[in-house]
Every structure is written in C-alpha cells, then in structure tokens.
Amino acid sequence: MNSSIKNNFIVSVIIPCYNVENYINECVKSVVNQDYEFIELICIDNASTDNTYQKLTELKSKYSFKLFQCTLPGANNARNLGIEKSSGLWIQFLDADDILYPSKISHQVKLINNSKIDVDFIVASSFHKDLKCELKKINPSEDKFIGVLESNFGNTCSNLFKSKSLIKLKGWDVNLKSSQEYNLMFRMIQNKCEFILDLKPLTLIRERGFGQISFQNPKLKWNQYVDLRLDIINYLKKEESNYYLSNEIIIKQILFDIIRILIKYDEKRALFVYNKYLIDFKPKKSLSTGVLYLLIFNILGFKRTEKIKRFLNLN
C-alpha cells in the first residue's frame, strides 16, 4: 500500500455476475491485485445459467471474498444487494467482464483525501475496448448536465461512489433496463452531490454485445434512453433555467441526434418527442447528422427526411 495515503478506509467492490464464466476469473484477479489494502470484495451471482456460480465458489476458496446469490433479475437488483451487504465507506461497482488496473482504487482514494470539498462521487476516464478489440480512451465531460445528456460522465465501473450517498438515494433503480448509470448520476446531481473529475484511465470497459439490453430490445433501450434525457431537460427548464437558456441549442442538438436513433425502432414516439420539444429547432451538422441530411431537412422537415434517409442511407 502506498504510504502517501493519509486516511485509509474500506472500499467495497461489488461485482454483479450473470453468465460470465469466461470473464469472472480475470475480473476478480484485477480486484485482488489492487495495490490498495483495505478492499472488501463482494460478488453477487444473479441467477446465472452457466458455470458462473461454480467459478465463483472456486475463486472464493482461493481469494476469500463475500459471495451472495440474488434471485431477482437484473444487475441493478444485484448491485443493490451488494450495497446492503457492504461495509465500505466507498463503493466501486465493477461489471464482471471489465477489469481494474492495479492502482485504480489507491489513486482515487488519494484524490478523495486531497480534495478540498466533501466528495460524494468521482467521475473518471476509462479505456474502452470495442468488439473489434480497438482501444479508445474516453474522457468525461466537464459539464455535468451535458455529460449525463450525452452519456459522457464516466461510467459504472470507472466512477467511485460514497456509500452513504447511494443509500440516501436508495441505490439503483431496479425498474430500468437501460441508462441505469446515468439515471443514478442524474439523481446524485439533483441531490446536490459533490463530485470531482479524474482524467487518469484506470478501468478497462469491454463491449460484449450479446446479452446486453441494446442487442436484446433496442426499442426499450432507446425509449428509456429518451425518457431520462427528457427528465433532465424538464429539470433544467424548471430548476436551472439560466443554464438551460444558455445551452439550449446544444441541448436540443443532443436530443435531436438521439431521436434520430429512436425513430428506427419507435417512429410514433420519436415524432411525438420531436413535435413537442424540437418543432422549431434548426439542427446543425454533428457526428450523426451530415450536410446532405440537413439540406433535405430544411426543405422537407423531419418526418419526410427520415423516410428518405432510409432509402438513401444518409447520416
């Protein structure tokens, strides 16, 4: 353990596990190999149908950690059970197919100890490995509202959370199948939780594809994704009106780009949102909206342009 850490406290690492027999060994080892001494590891088997639980029992006999079974479906139920069973002042959530680099927790403990504010959570950079095994560093937005709107405010595994702040918010929303982490972080922002940014990437996020909600039910994913963004926008209009007016064009562009995805899966809902929130908005060129699309849009409007886009494969 690094002697420069002034105040040592327990960090509980909570790993929800569902059908991850091929990943869990490396994930657990990444926790065991942390250079921070005061770690409580909690693994929650979430009714796996493969050999995950057997793997966990083998690992438990080798590394000695807490192991529980959660019969309620969904990672959020497993995470909440982990919070209930934890004793740490801080909580590190870790998906079973991701890994922590050895100094991840000690580094963030130092940030907490050196902070001049009473921190509730850390928003951190991470490395992402996609299905093509290409590695990319993702830095979080410095603007908390734009960050949660764009899904760029750290993530479940790179961030670190104070236990009492999570308990105050009653943990994760178990009714959500999508946007769970940004729902949690938005609720923390609403409750005036303090955060600090950590731009050192010490977490590896690996995209699996199969088994993820975005692959199982994209209509549900994108509807819940839009639901949260509308909640954020309505909150900003009511509680942060000056901020909203100063950033209205950026916010509406984000929403426009999102409903361009939603319309692929739920045309009726996408058109409803467009007519309610964006009817007078003039979109700009963005990563997902090209010049040709905008030329057609300015003549024919949103609905007709989207129909033409499907035939011409426009972006």
Image (cartoon, helix red, strand yellow):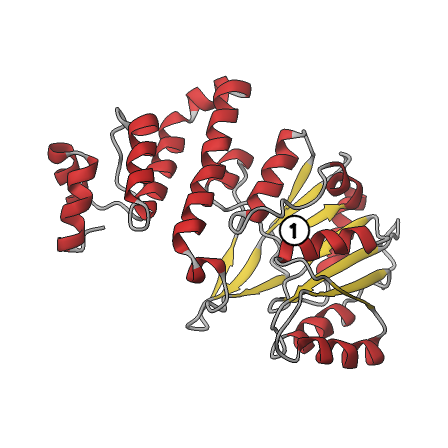
Relative vertical location of residue 243 with respect to residue 305 in this rendering, above or below:
above
Given the image, on which type of amino acid does mark 1 rest? Asn
Between 251 and 223, the one lying in front of the other is 223
Residue 188 % position (x, y): 65, 36
Q: Is residue 37 left or right of residue 29?
A: right
| Residue matched to label 1 | 159
Res. 169 image quadrant = top right
Q: Is residue 273 left or right of residue 237?
A: left
Residues packed near mark 1 inside 10 Å, few (<14), some (14 to 19) or many (20 plus):
many
Residue 176 in sight here? yes
Which SS class for mark 1? loop
Between 196 and 81, the one lying in front of the other is 81
Residue 21 % position (x, y): 63, 78
Q: Is residue 225 left or right of residue 65?
A: left
Q: Residue at x 62, y 62 (%)?
A: 203
Q: Residue at x 46, y 38 (%)?
A: 227
Residue lying furthest left: 299
Residue 210 % position (x, y): 47, 69
How many labels were placed on the picture? 1
